[in-house]
Amino acid sequence: MRFVTDQMGRQVEVPLKPIRIVSLVPSQTELLYYLGLEKEVVGQTLFCIHPKKMNETKPRVGGTKKLNINKIKALKPDLIIGNKEENLKEQIDELTSEFPVWMSDIKTIEDAYWMMQQVGELVGRNAEAGQLVSEIRVAFENIPKAHKSAIYLIWQKPFMAAGCDTYIHNLMQQIGIKNLVTITRYPELSVTEINKIDPELILLSSEPFPFGKKHIIELQPIFHNAKLMMVDGEMFSWYGSRMLLAAKYLNGLGI
């Protein structure tokens, strides 16, 4: 066993080589598979949908915020990997009383890089994780800057947007989009407030609320000064190996 410090500053005693891993966050689950941990991952959430092959075969332990603690205990993990924003503190505390739980806390792209490198170290894939981070850095550096102002909506009824102090906000900055929502985290906004902010773009995310093309037709008359645009929520919010795909997606978004 060894002690490591997670992204929440917690000291966690973990095995030298974990062989039974439960992942509680979709993007980090996908990262584990990218690093070659197909056999070691013994449990994942209902929302861990990539890659499809593992989505169809791995045991489910509930949703990210509604974990089935009994199922997790039955899997007897020697390492659980979670996230401060995605998982509820009460459930993480309960799991921590019995198992090693390593937590990420990601608000920036740099946090995501650090997480990938640390997970690589946790599972004995240092070189693979380092190479992945290097490739993503180069890919993001080559994305042309958009020079637009925007609001990124994640929910309807009420409208909710990605504010500052979020990974989405930082990613928008990285590609030259000025996020006009300066309130922290995910504030609720009225139609009047959004129109007063007057963004050039309103980005409608495909998750967690499933915005679609019909919503552009419905909302364009309401937000008459802005261009409404559908975007893939995974590409804006999944930190991990999907960032390689995100860089290509963002490069071709045409904002």
Image (cartoon, rainbow, N blue to C red):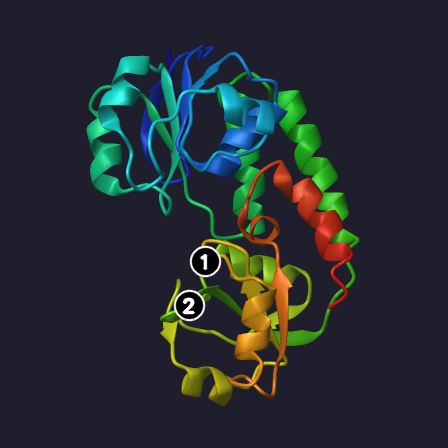
**Image quadrant in which you'd find residue 4:** top left
Q: Identify whether 51 is placed above or below 229.
A: above
Q: Identify whether 105 is placed above or below 91.
A: below
Q: Residue at x 61, y 23 (%)?
A: 35
Residue 137, x across and y down, in percent? 71, 44
Q: Residues within 10 Å of mark 1 (few under 14, many from 20)?
A: some
Badge number at residue 209 = 1
Give the secondary structure at mark 2: loop
Front-lying residue, 172 or 75: 75
Front-lying residue, 166 or 242: 242
Residue 20, x across and y down, in percent? 41, 13
Cα distance, mark 2 to mark 1? 7 Å
Using residue 53 as the reference point, say whether residue 41 is left or right of it: left
The residue type indicated by label 2 comes to: Gln
- The reply to whether discs 2 and 1 touch (Cβ–Cβ < 8 Å) is yes
Q: Residue at x 58, y 38 (%)?
A: 240
Residue 114, x across and y down, in percent? 54, 38
Give the secondary structure at mark 1: loop
Front-lying residue, 67 or 214: 214
Q: Earlier in the sequence, mark 2 or mark 1?
A: 2
Q: Report the residue marked by disc 2.
A: 156
The residue type indicated by label 1 comes to: Phe
Quarter occupied by the C terminus: bottom right
Q: Identify whether 88 is placed above or below 3.
A: below
Using residue 18 as the reference point, say whether residue 137 is left or right of it: right
